């Protein structure tokens, strides 16, 4: 059997969605950690010379980059634990909502809201909420996007269950209001309680520190943050009215 490898970075939601899919399908694979994402390893550059980003998926002689492209390959290669419904219309709707979330750049908007200030922060947060309102409607009456079990769309949007709350805390903002989004709030709970997901999440405290320091860099601040500095940072953020990070397409780097 061809060897399966996944090159990723611990804080990357893109690499994590591939890991979730492989775990759900029971595929054994070797995980290779890219230790310093800002000092690319020779292996990463060799395997993904175009984008030089994680995740990178290796299956025998095949090398695939981009998380959604990797997921599509996994669906075709391993038929067990299907993540897409059999019904053609249902499959089309899954693709529609996946494309909708990507085209509306909800992850980018949430990231921008975390690492911005003032009007730019408000604009990015509102964009995120506007997209979530549409997703909320799709979730009503469901345990998961896939119905009673985790499916492709759950994996695609899985970052919202764990990364988004961390970004809310780091950015001193509230995007997912349980009263406004009860279906999404319930989904987050169900998703994080699934054994495969629960056992394959990065440490939250480490995430907080990492994204505090990423935000610091993007805002041009100095010094490294630890958890003890969190309260002071949050207080300062609430009193800042101006400033933003560079365009998110240039700044997201896992």
Image (cartoon, rainbow, N blue to C red):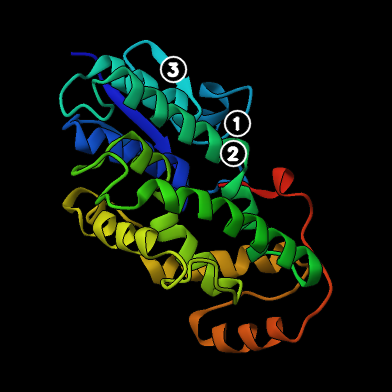
Reply above or below: 134 against 110. above
| Element type where label 3 sits in the image | strand
Is residue 160 or residue 32 the one in the foreground?
160
Q: Is residue 137 left or right of residue 3?
A: right
First in residue order: circle 1 vs circle 2: 2
* Residue pointed to by mark 1: 52
Outermost residue toward the top in this view: 61
| Label 2 to label 3: alpha-carbon separation | 17 Å
First in residue order: circle 2 vs circle 3: 2
Quadrant where the N terminus sits is top left
| Residues at circles 1 and 2 in contact by the CB criterion of under 8 Å | yes
| Image mark count | 3
Residue 225 picture location, percent across and down: 59, 77
Q: Which mark is residue 176?
A: none
Quarter of the view holding residue 181: bottom left
Q: Residue at x 31, y 13 (%)?
A: 60
Q: Which mark is residue 40?
A: 2
Reply above or below: 127 against 122. above
Count residues near mark 1 (Cα–Cα under 10 Å), then give few for <14, some for 14-19, many for 20+: some
| Label 1 to label 2: alpha-carbon separation | 7 Å
* Residue pointed to by mark 3: 63
Is residue 2 something that shows in the picture?
yes
Count residues near mark 2 (Cα–Cα under 10 Å), then give few for <14, some for 14-19, many for 20+: few
Count residues near mark 3 (Cα–Cα under 10 Å), then give few for <14, some for 14-19, many for 20+: some
| Element type where label 1 sits in the image | loop
Residue 26 picture location, percent across and down: 16, 32
| Label 3 to label 1: alpha-carbon separation | 13 Å
Outermost residue toward the right in this view: 242
Q: Nearer the viewer, mark 1 or mark 2?
A: 1
């Amino acid at each position: 059997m061809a060897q399966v490898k996944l090159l990723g970075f611990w804080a990357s939601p893109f690499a994590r969605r591939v890991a979730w899919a492989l775990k759900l399908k029971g595929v054994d694979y070797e995980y290779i950690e890219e230790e310093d994402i800002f000092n690319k390893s020779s292996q990463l550059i060799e395997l993904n010379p175009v984008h030089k980003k994680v995740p990178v998926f290796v299956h025998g002689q095949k090398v695939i980059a981009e998380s959604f492209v990797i997921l599509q390959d996994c669906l075709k290669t391993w038929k067990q634990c299907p993540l897409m419904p059999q019904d053609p219309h249902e499959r089309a709707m899954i693709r529609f909502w996946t494309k909708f979330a990507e085209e509306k750049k909800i992850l980018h908007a949430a990231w921008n809201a975390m690492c911005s200030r003032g009007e730019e922060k408000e604009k990015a947060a509102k964009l995120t909420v506007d997209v979530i309102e549409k997703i909320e409607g799709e979730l009503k009456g469901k345990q998961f996007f896939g119905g009673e079990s985790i499916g492709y769309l759950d994996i695609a949007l899985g970052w919202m269950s764990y990364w988004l709350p961390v970004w809310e805390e780091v950015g001193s903002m509230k995007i997912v209001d349980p009263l406004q989004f009860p279906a999404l709030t319930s989904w987050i709970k169900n998703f994080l309680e699934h054994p495969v997901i629960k056992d394959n999440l990065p440490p939250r405290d480490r995430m907080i520190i990492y994204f505090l320091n990423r935000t610091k860099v993007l805002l041009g601040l100095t010094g490294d943050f630890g958890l003890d500095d969190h309260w002071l940072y949050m207080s300062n953020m609430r009193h800042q009215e101006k400033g933003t990070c560079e365009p998110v397409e240039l700044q997201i780097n896992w």
